[in-house]
Image (cartoon, helix red, strand yellow):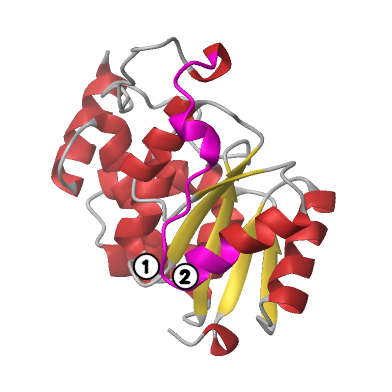
Amino acid sequence: MNINESMALIADDDEFFRLALRVVLTEKLEILEVLETGSLDDAIEAIGANDAVGFAFFDLNMPGLDTFSGIRATREAFPHVRVAVVSASRSRGDVLRALDAGAHGFVPKGEGIKQMEEAIRLIVNGGIYVPEFLTDIQNTENGLPGESVEILMPEASQLDNLTPRQHDVLTHVVKGMSNKEIARSMSVSESTVKFHVASLCLRLGVKNRTQIAAQASGFKSR
């Protein structure tokens, strides 16, 4: 992947952090174009509409990204995009869950521009970045010594807190519409619809759209 020919996307509702990250991407790594969004829905639509997006940086506290299923669904829908988490969290569990979801790195906020540049340079050049505190098992802030980290997946009944786009896609899936039909109806790309379908599968603990429809219909009838 040619870094200078790829777009980067920053998905974070903190405009000051977006500015700092933009400086690193454009001035230090010479990425020519950087897109900015403040929510998961907007981020996915931007990636779906721009094939040149090669790198995406997601804040864990971004609106719509309430579970790590959003990271996994992004990787499944857009396998060519290198996805990294940027977060103020210093939880070892968050780092491990992000990596388990397929993230190419976990970049802590507040580490300074130089450290951020080194971390992002590694990620965009094909490496995997993890923060040093991941190895600090004695730090109680990061988990008790010897404590195992359970990789949590959303419960099958979790249909609350859907983003507006996820709710729209769910409604269309229940109606039996194909990805192409849903994309046409919502005026988005099929890749964007694929992301939302994958995200719904992970939320509900099912494997395909038929099972999504069955689960959703069952919940509505209760």
Query: In the displayed structure, does residue 88 sit left or right of residue 60?
Result: right
Cβ atoms under marks 1 and 2 closer than 8 Å: yes
> From where the camera sits, is residue 18 visible?
no
x, y percentage for residue 128?
Answer: 42, 57
- Magenta range is 120-139
Query: In the displayed structure, does residue 19 sit left or right of residue 99?
Result: right
Q: Is residue 98 above or below residue 52?
A: above
Q: Tell which of 210 and 54 is nearer to you.
A: 54
x, y percentage for residue 77?
Answer: 33, 62
In the image, farthest residue toward the right:
16
x, y percentage for residue 8?
Answer: 60, 71
Badge 2 is on which residue? 48
> From where the camera sits, is residue 134 visible?
yes
Sequence-wise, the earlier of marks 1 and 2 is: 2
In 3D space, how far apart are the residues under numbered discs 1 and 2 (Cα atoms)? 6 Å
Q: Which mark is residue 191?
A: 1
What's the amino acid at mark 1? Ser
